[in-house]
Image (tube, rainbow, N blue to C red):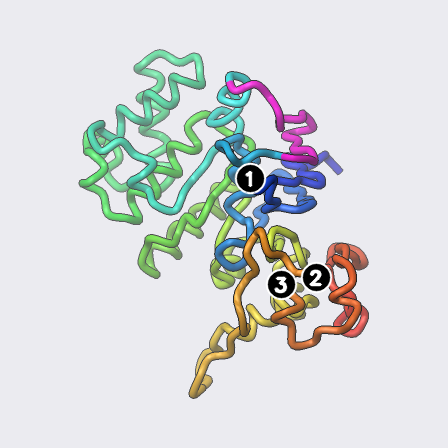
Amino acid sequence: MSPPVLSVRGLDVGFDLRGGFVPAIRGISLDIAAGEILGVVGESGAGKSLTGTAVTGLLEPPGRIAGGEILLQGERIDGLPLRAMRAIRGRRIGSVFQDPLTSLNPLLRVGDQLVETIRAHLPLSRAEARAKALALLREVGIPAAEQRLMDHPHRFSGGMRQRVVIALALAADPVLLIADEPTTALDVSAQAQVTGLIKRLCRERGMAVMLVTHDMGVIAETADRVAVMYAGRVVEQGPVEDVLRRPLHPYTRGLMAAIPAMGERRARLAQIDGAMPRLDAMPAGCAFHPRCPAVAEACRAAVPPLRGEGTRQAACVRLEEYA
């Protein structure tokens, strides 16, 4: 098998604060192959977006990578000088964020922004870059693409703006796409169109995609594999269908139970009691144990490692009971 496009090994990320270093991500390990979509899911504050930020080299002080490795096509990219990382970002790693308006300059026409991005990374003339920009708009499904090149971002709907942002992310033909909550600001129909577009482009281009989201429905529709994060750690990972049908970790089971079933009437939705711990007040042992309905004494003693057979892994001391 070919090596993964992205390989993250034992990644530690945290913040240098007045009271000392506060860890936010602890020992994350992920692989994404070409043509594969890895969904990263969890509550707000779990460390999903911070993981994507670390991969793209966009961490700003006081945040920093404290340990581990990030490899892109076998090349280690964590700790690269700013200029070297800037050359990789946009050229080999594309990014899509949740609010397309923050990724687009409202004063420039969409075509100018695409041409500028293309020429920043590829040795093309302005005419060649414009032709590529037009092809990109058509590829992401913008109707009347030639006319829309001349429009400013405010002339596009939310879903169409996100398509433009995806076109920008693809401008230099990256091998990895980081999509951080790309559907959050969109209505349901636009969400479906954007997730379908990401899935199609991943297959057609053979890109690796990290899809960061809090929405298990988006994961079910789009991803091939899923990594469930809680309090800065991956607590479960495996093929999407297996994880959604038979979750092994109590946190994943809680997330799935909170999704209402079609046709089922409930007086109240299921929920996970409590809240995620603060970064500077992590409980001993498994961080989920204060909220876990199946807590055991061993859960308080030590942090359980990810373990399991084949493609399924979970970080739970009672894994054998649920496997």
SS state under label 3: helix
SS state under label 2: loop
Residue sitting nearer the eye, 57 or 157: 57
Q: Which sits earlier in the primary sequence, circle 3 or circle 2?
A: 3
Residue 16: x and y in percent read 56, 37
Q: Is 112 above or below relative to 246?
A: above
Does residue 203 appear in this view?
no
- Residue 300 lies in the magenta stretch: no
- Label 1 neighbour load within 10 Å: few <14, some 14-19, many 20+: some
Which residue was labeled with disc 1? 15
Report how far apart the C-alphas of labels 3 and 2 lie in the structure: 25 Å
Q: Residue, x 63% and y 57% (percent of image)?
A: 282
Amino acid at dot 2: Cys
Residue sitting nearer the eye, 249 or 75: 249
* Start-end of magenta stretch: 66-82
Amino acid at dot 1: Phe
Q: Is 61 above or below relative to 307?
A: above
Report how far apart the C-alphas of labels 2 and 1 lie in the structure: 21 Å
Q: Residue, x 36% and y 37% (percent of image)?
A: 165
Which numbered dot is residue 57? Answer: none
Which numbered dot is residue 286? Answer: 2
Q: Which sits earlier in the primary sequence, circle 2 or circle 1?
A: 1
Q: Is residue 250 left or right of residue 124?
A: right
Which numbered dot is residue 241? Answer: 3
